[in-house]
Image (spheres, rainbow, N blue to C red):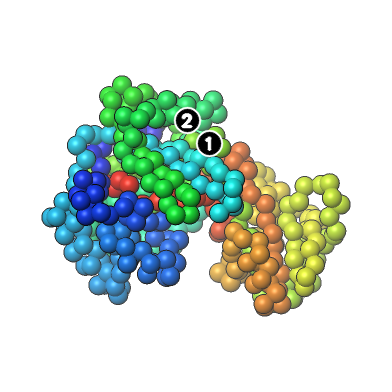
Amino acid sequence: MVEIKEFQGLIYNKEKLNKLKVEFKNIICPPYDIISPNEHRSLLFKKYNFVNLELPKGSKTKKYQNAKKTFSSWKRSKIIIEDSLPSIYIYQHKFSYPANSQKYYTRYGIFCLVKADPEYKEIFPHERINPKPIEERMRLVETLGIETSSPFLLVEDPEKKFLNMILKLLKPYSLFLEIKQDDGQEHKVYRISDPQSIKNIKNFFKSKNLYIADGHHRYRVYCDYLKKNKKEYFMAYISSLEDDGLLILPTHRAVAGGHIYEEIKRYFDIVDWDGRSNLEIVLYHNGVFKTLKPKFYFDNLPKIVLKNPYFLLDKVLSELEGEDIRQHLFYHQDMKEAISYADKYNGCAFIMPSVKKEDFVKIVKNKIIFPPKTTYFYPKVYCGFVFYKL
């Protein structure tokens, strides 16, 4: 049984920022793991930007002290305050995809507290975690005592009960924040403090499991931190799997060296596309696109993933090159970037399809971990709207 609850979030003081003429669009930032060095420098120039806590500047040890100093200063000057009432916060994110196009989507979700499940009995992962990010995020959490960015969780919602429940709560009087960014993205946060509405949301989750879409390392850090400090709840962002604004982008692969093109023929027929059949894996090499048709399937793959292109390609490349190949692959959501890499290093690019939501659920429910860099849930959940004192 998944337990969620309301909380008094830490928030930016709107009144104070208005007096200082600081716009909220200059406050929020993406999560730390997708901030490029150039974007990081740009965000640091914006006064009071949340990146100072989410990805603080400084050397390996100095950055944690910088974050602590900034956080203490912002609390002291009441830039950051505690919200007045225990609440659940609905986050509405409007965005274009492809980016800067005229095709818009809107995704809905909630920020709430979730009871940690360190054994992964009700909250299911789909990615492996690495020790280094765990260590770095733990240092930050232990230094600040707050959760700056939340794991992104998903809930099955076949009848759209959860989605419709939160849509009905989007009343003008509940609107807490409204931000429009220069690139056209729009963010709205609604604060829900009504006890009956909160109870209804809590009841929905009692019979549910949750799936980690993004933030596996953060989730592990919070579980470990809470256990160490004899606490139970962390802040999460939860969205419905049935939300039309929930996009799962493919992650294409590329590998250097032309030898792969010949070696891969042991496992695949390299053929022209007939224009009708579904494309599973498109192979690009030396300016030519072909499709890959498996000659056989691996008996030692679980039946549920036997024909999944990501598992199949991962198995083939690991058989050919050894499991270290995963660290040497080039990964990107943009097909053009993968092709450019293949051209640059006389290699191959593998143009992959998106993982279907129903396949994602079936595989994760069976506690099977996807190959690295399979899913990219788009867009990432921005930071700085509300955060949590652990």
| CB within 8 Å, label 1 to label 2 | yes
Q: Count neighbours of disc 1 (C-alpha within 10 A) and say few if under 14, some if 14 to 19, many if 20 or more.
A: some
Disc 2 residue type?
A: Leu
Position above or below: 173 against 325: above
User: Element type at marker 2?
Assistant: helix
| Residue 146 visible in the picture | yes
Q: Nearer the viewer, residue 283 or 35?
A: 35
Q: Nearer the viewer, residue 11 or 196?
A: 11
Q: Mark 1 points at which residue?
A: 243
Q: Which residue is drawn at 56% across and 37% down?
A: 244
The answer to whether 8 appears left or right of 77 in the picture is right
The answer to whether 297 appears left or right of 130 in the picture is right
| Residue 201 image point, x, y percent | 37, 27
| Residue 303 image point, x, y percent | 67, 44
Q: Count neighbours of disc 2 (C-alpha within 10 A) and say few if under 14, some if 14 to 19, many if 20 or more.
A: some
Q: Which residue is drawn at 42% across and 25% down?
A: 168
Position above or below: 109 against 53: above
Q: Residue at x 39, y 30 (%)?
A: 170
